[in-house]
Image (cartoon, rainbow, N blue to C red):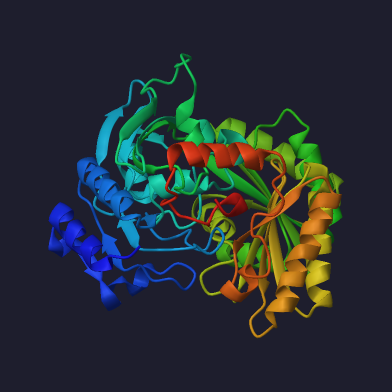
């Protein structure tokens, strides 16, 4: 873009000078070392539309910004001229408790939304990390989720309608504000996980769930990941209906136990199982969970309720924690029967390279997250680790993406990994929705 001053003036005309940052004030909005020339915070969907139309006219590259919790996701951007902050679009537009739906502006944080909805005994069944900062629009754009996805699904399963502003400023909507909508293409799902490359979400309508009367947890210690994985497989293959089943490496298990204030022996791995329902049903199911764990050789078993239950799951959800040393966050997806093997081999490969590593896994969907402290390690060694673990995931029938990494590591690996034939379809959608390529250029799959 050849006219940054013109972009700043246009942004000030649209949203007001008090809602525009330039120069050093824009530094907190840098992405992978690129600082935007302009940061603008529109106060309405109309202002979002006008900003995007102006940006397209100037061929300015635009990155949408929610709470800034997923800025490490994706390849480095090719260009970054304008960050469009949705912080001022933070209201509840509509809540229909009888229909179990809520429409929220995209810049509203998940924590603020839940605080409103729980007054009516309802909630959005998503529990990603950093709920106090993560916005509903950002959660959809990154398709972020948490441990409860086993019971409730992902953002793609819970969103029923969206309003979106496209690169040329056109405003469209997808889906309908009713749960039972079966007409036409389900276009609202298209934007989930697209990382803001097809348009900018301004409103999201969710299907809601009633708050469970009770949620409690069984936390078991095991000598090996294989034994804990065997217990998890028994639980998932039974008639039980767990809300979450997480396999924890030794370091992650110790952190969860410490948060829950229960004793834990060094070197033991963990299995955490969340059950939610009426109290009698919870206690009956937890008794069955305990039986499965003891049958698989658990070394210790803990029943967590109240504050201990909440603290355990906060530690799991926020893994590896705000104070943990980390420089690489990886996410592997494999068949659930291969989860313990991916965790074990990933940790072993890290040890061979003198990298500290811990891992947690959502066993049901087969998702493994690694946190690797590669500080002070040559980027070539860190990149080699990524590619080697990616090869293991592929060998086990899955794939692996990089959620966070230093820029010098990102320059050596494709954070998304091989995509295959789907890339042509994605490129076609990008060309249709954003022909000038101004939305988050370069960050998505295949450099889209």
Decide if residue 112 is in sight here. Answer: yes
Q: Residue at x 49, y 21 (%)?
A: 185
434 or 259: which is nearer to us? 434
In the image, residue 279 lies at what x, y percent? Answer: 54, 34
256 or 204: which is nearer to us? 204
Quadrant location of the N terminus?
bottom left
In the image, residue 48 lies at what x, y percent? Answer: 26, 46
Q: Is residue 40 left or right of residue 236?
A: left
**Which residue is farthest front?**
2
Position of 235 relative to 304 (above/below): above
In the image, residue 181 lies at what x, y percent? Answer: 44, 17
Position of 2 relative to 277 (above/below): below
Q: Residue at x 64, y 37 (%)?
A: 242
402 or 434: which is nearer to us? 434
Q: Is residue 144 left or right of residue 51?
A: right
Q: Quadrant location of residue 415? A: bottom right
Q: Is residue 238 left or right of residue 197?
A: right
């Amino acid at each position: 873009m050849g006219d940054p001053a013109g972009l700043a003036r246009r942004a000030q005309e649209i949203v007001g000078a008090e809602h525009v940052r330039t120069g050093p004030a824009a530094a907190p909005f840098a992405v992978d070392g690129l600082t935007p020339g302009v940061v603008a915070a529109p106060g309405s969907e109309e202002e979002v539309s006008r900003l995007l139309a102006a940006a397209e006219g100037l061929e300015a590259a635009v990155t949408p910004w929610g709470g800034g919790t997923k800025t490490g996701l994706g390849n480095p951007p090719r260009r970054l001229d304008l960050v469009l902050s949705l912080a001022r679009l933070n209201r509840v537009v509509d809540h229909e408790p009888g229909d179990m739906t809520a429409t929220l502006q995209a810049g509203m944080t998940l924590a603020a939304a839940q605080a409103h909805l729980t007054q009516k005994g309802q909630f959005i069944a998503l529990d990603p990390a950093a709920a106090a900062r993560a916005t509903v629009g950002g959660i959809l754009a990154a398709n972020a989720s948490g441990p409860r996805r086993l019971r409730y699904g992902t953002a793609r399963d819970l969103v029923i309608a969206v309003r979106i502003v496209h690169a040329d400023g056109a405003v469209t909507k997808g889906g309908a504000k009713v749960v039972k909508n079966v007409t036409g293409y389900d276009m609202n799902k298209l934007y989930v996980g697209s990382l803001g490359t097809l348009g900018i979400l301004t409103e999201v309508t969710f299907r809601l769930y009633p708050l469970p009367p009770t949620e409690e947890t069984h936390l078991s210690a095991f000598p090996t990941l294989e034994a804990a994985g065997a217990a998890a497989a028994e639980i998932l293959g039974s008639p039980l209906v767990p809300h979450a089943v997480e396999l924890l490496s030794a370091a992650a298990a110790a952190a969860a136990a410490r948060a829950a204030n229960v004793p834990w022996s060094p070197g033991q791995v963990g299995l955490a199982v969340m059950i939610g329902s009426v109290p009698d049903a919870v206690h009956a199911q937890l008794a069955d969970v305990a039986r499965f764990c003891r049958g698989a050789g658990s070394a210790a078993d803990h029943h967590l309720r109240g504050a201990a239950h909440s603290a355990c799951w906060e530690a799991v959800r926020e893994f590896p924690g705000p104070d943990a040393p980390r420089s690489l966050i990886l996410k592997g997806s494999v068949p659930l029967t291969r989860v313990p093997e991916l965790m074990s081999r990933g940790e072993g490969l890290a040890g061979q390279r003198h990298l500290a590593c811990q891992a947690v896994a959502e066993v049901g969907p087969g998702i493994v997250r690694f946190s690797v402290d590669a500080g002070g390690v040559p980027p070539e060694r860190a990149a080699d680790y990524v590619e080697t673990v990616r090869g293991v995931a592929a060998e086990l029938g899955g794939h692996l993406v990089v959620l966070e990494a230093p820029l010098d590591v990102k320059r050596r690996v494709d954070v998304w990994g091989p995509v295959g034939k789907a890339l042509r379809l994605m490129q076609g959608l990008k060309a249709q929705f954003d022909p000038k390529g101004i939305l988050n250029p370069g960050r998505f799959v295949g450099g889209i």
